[in-house]
Image (tube, rainbow, N blue to C red):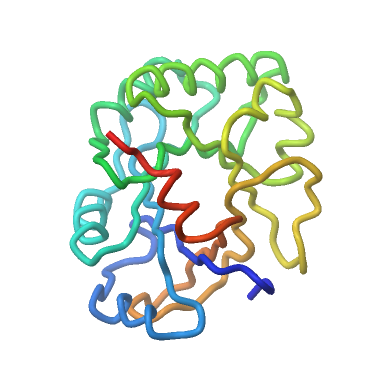
Amino acid sequence: MPCCYEVHGIDISHHQGVIDWEQLISSQNTGFPIRFIFMKATEGDDHSDDAFSHNFDCARQYGFIRGAYHFFSPKTDPRKQADFFIRSVHLSVGDLPPVLDVESNGKRSVGELKTAVKTWLDCVETHYGVKPILYTSYKFKTRYLDDPVFDSYPYWIAHYYVDSVKYEGRWTFWQHTDAGSVPGIKKDVDLNVFNGSLEDLKALTLQK
């Protein structure tokens, strides 16, 4: 676990299988209590994660701060992808802003990828009234999305097996491993920290 971070969380999808939420909530009594959970909701313009609806409801029921993310397909119309996410995900007060997960350039040029990503972000921000979170790896962002236009979005950085974040810009969440273990989930799970206090995290959530 990275040193000196107060707020810990995980991100999940159907790959984690059936989750024992009673066991997962018991993590609150450990030295690294899970406070937030991001869940995969959609991918492309027509694929829903099978576990999303159930996990999203359970996260709220068990008192976790919850969020939903979309896995971006560079070869698919970004407006159609945004519309699909909007139809699939109904956020409420106390939920984290929507997340765009960008991991592939789909053989698009840097300019084409930037335009597509910005289009999705704009559509989703217009609908929810809040700036989305941008998730991508340290290397991918510096190579493909190194543009001031993206620096205004909360950045969730994927940067594994290092003692500290090497990224020199601002970041909000850090996914520091993809091989974590938590109560209630039998398979490996991604572990994250929030760059701030629990009060700061709550302030980031939807307020209306």
Determine whether 80 is above or below 145 in the image.
above
Determine whether 73 is above or below 159 in the image.
above
Q: Quadrant of the N terminus?
A: bottom right
Residue 129 lies left or right of residue 167; in this view the side is: left
Q: Quadrant of the C terminus?
A: top left
Residue at the location (41% across, 28% down)?
130
Foreground pick, 5 / 73: 5
Judged from this view, the residue extending furthest toward the front is 199
Determine whether 118 is above or below 21 in the image.
above
Residue at the location (38% across, 23% down)?
82
Number of numbered discs: 0
Q: Where is residue 127 in the image (x, y as percent from the top left)?
A: 33, 20
Q: Where is residue 100 in the image (x, y as percent from the top left)?
A: 49, 35
Judged from this view, the residue extending furthest toward the bottom is 30
Q: Where is residue 87 in the image (x, y as percent from the top left)?
A: 24, 27
Determine whether 56 is above or below 26 in the image.
above
Residue at the location (32% across, 38% down)?
207
Residue 202 lies left or right of residue 56; in this view the side is: right
Residue 188 lies left or right of residue 92; in this view the side is: right
Foreground pick, 36 / 181: 36
Foreground pick, 29 / 102: 29
Residue 133 lies left or right of residue 106; in this view the side is: left
Q: Where is residue 121 in the image (x, y as percent from the top left)?
A: 49, 23
